[in-house]
């Protein structure tokens, strides 16, 4: 049976209604009847081919929640009728040294849901069951959808690198940042939120931030020097990284999860002098995804969302381009 979807036929195009014939279920595949799909900035990057990896026709959408309606013959850990979620990663070889070390998200043979495959702006999807995850009952589908990409993207470095961090800064309070503040606060960290939008100050505190700094206030930035153990950068624009590095205490970590496109220029002497660590972090492996969903369910971490019907996908994308959302759009079937 054909699958109804929304597609971009070329870079930057408005999405149109479309249908395609899905491939037959492979032994480890499942078919999911989609109820919700979050919209991520990565969907915009893929629509516009900003990363040079897009293949058209392109069906975006990689924060998928739905119900299993069909199983491949080797699928035993999921059942028909079960609510599941799918994030950015579609598959990995599960045989190489990287996968065997528990880093299947870094597998050189991994594939993504919307790179060479059709994604979640659709009524159904067929995908590898080994990268589909049971959704805890305590999480609503609307609020859980963004956790499958944005949530695991910020949870992963906080849980992996932040074990000795008592004071954490989050740069950018948007789709990623508003979840990072919640996770860090629920982990017991003292959180400082950096935002260029003063109107977000009260919201950042409501999310769990103890301190909020206007990133355009030079005096406030100067006063915060050497106060943090870790800085998590969630924005995708270039900033004065030297200034932010000065926020860190000795042995501090500057971690990027936002895809900043411009090269970074820093003094190597500053890194040596304070033994700073600069790193990036990808989404997270399957174990981390399960841990993140469980943590969110137990501690009440939810995405702040605005839902729109799937048919209004172009309205949502246009508003996202203008950053006109608090804090994630979720399409509802």
Image (cartoon, grey):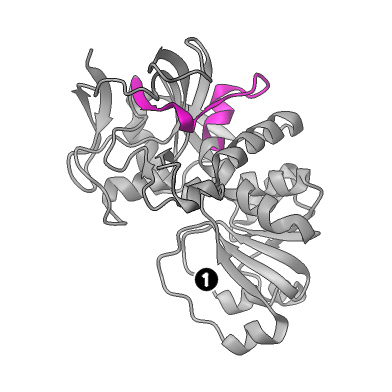
Where in the figure is residue 115, as x and y percent of width and height? 31, 43
Percent x, y of residue 263? 42, 74
The N terminus - image quarter: top left
- Residue 84 location (% of width, % of height): 51, 22
For label 1, the residue is: 239
Tag 1, which secondary structure?
Answer: loop
Name the spot of residue 283 as percent of width and height, x first: 52, 48
At 22% from the left and 25% from the top, the residue drawn is 17
**What residue occupies the far bottom of the structure in this picture?**
269
Q: Residue at x 57, y 86 (%)?
A: 268
Give the number of marks: 1
Circle 1 packing at 10 Å, graded few (<14), some (14-19), many (20+), is few
255 to the left or right of 210: left
* Left or right placement of residue 32 versus residue 266 in this view: left
Q: Residue at x 41, y 36 (%)?
A: 62
Does the segment drawn in magenta span residue 137? yes
Question: Which residue is more in the foreground, 286 or 17?
Answer: 286
In this view, the residue in front, 257 or 221, is 257
Q: Nearer the viewer, residue 94 or 31?
A: 94
Identify the image quadrant of the C terminus.
top left
| Residue 192 seen in the current view | no
User: Is 299 a magenta residue?
Assistant: no
Q: Residue at x 72, y 57 (%)?
A: 162
Quarter of image, res 151 = top right
User: Against 236, is 323 above or below?
Assistant: above
Residue 126 in view in this figure: yes
Q: Bounds of the magenta span?
A: 124-147
Q: Quadrant of residue 75 in the image?
A: top left
Residue 251 higher or lower than 43, as above or below: below
């Amino acid at each position: 049976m054909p699958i109804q979807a929304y597609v971009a036929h070329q870079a930057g195009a408005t999405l149109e209604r479309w249908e395609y014939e899905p491939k037959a279920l492979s032994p480890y595949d499942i078919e999911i009847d989609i109820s919700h799909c979050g919209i991520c900035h990565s969907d915009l990057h893929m629509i516009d081919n900003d990363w040079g990896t897009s293949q058209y026709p392109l069906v975006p959408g990689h924060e998928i929640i739905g119900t299993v309606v069909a199983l491949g013959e080797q699928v035993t850990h999921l059942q028909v009728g079960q609510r599941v979620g799918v994030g950015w990663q579609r598959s990995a070889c599960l045989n190489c040294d990287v996968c065997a070390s528990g880093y299947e998200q870094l597998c050189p043979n991994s594939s993504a849901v919307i790179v060479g495959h059709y994604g979640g702006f659709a009524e159904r999807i067929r995908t590898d069951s080994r990268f589909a995850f049971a959704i805890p009952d305590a999480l609503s589908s609307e609020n859980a959808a963004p956790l499958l990409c944005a949530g695991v993207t910020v949870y992963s470095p906080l849980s992996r690198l932040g074990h000795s961090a008592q004071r954490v800064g989050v740069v950018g309070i948007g789709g990623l940042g508003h979840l990072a503040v919640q996770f860090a606060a629920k982990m017991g960290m003292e959180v400082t939120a950096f935002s260029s939008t003063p109107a977000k100050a009260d919201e950042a505190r409501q999310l769990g931030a103890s301190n909020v700094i206007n990133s355009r206030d030079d005096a406030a930035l100067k006063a915060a020097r050497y106060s943090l153990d870790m800085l998590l950068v969630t924005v995708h624009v270039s900033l004065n990284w030297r200034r932010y590095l000065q926020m860190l205490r000795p042995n501090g970590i500057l971690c990027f999860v936002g895809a900043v496109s411009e090269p970074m220029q820093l003094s190597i002497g500053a890194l040596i002098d304070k033994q700073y660590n600069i790193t990036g972090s990808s989404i997270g492996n399957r174990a981390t995804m399960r841990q993140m969903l469980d943590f969110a369910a137990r501690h009440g971490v939810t995405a702040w969302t605005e839902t729109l019907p799937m048919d209004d996908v172009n309205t949502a994308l246009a508003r996202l381009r203008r950053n006109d959302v608090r804090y994630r759009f979720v399409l509802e079937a």
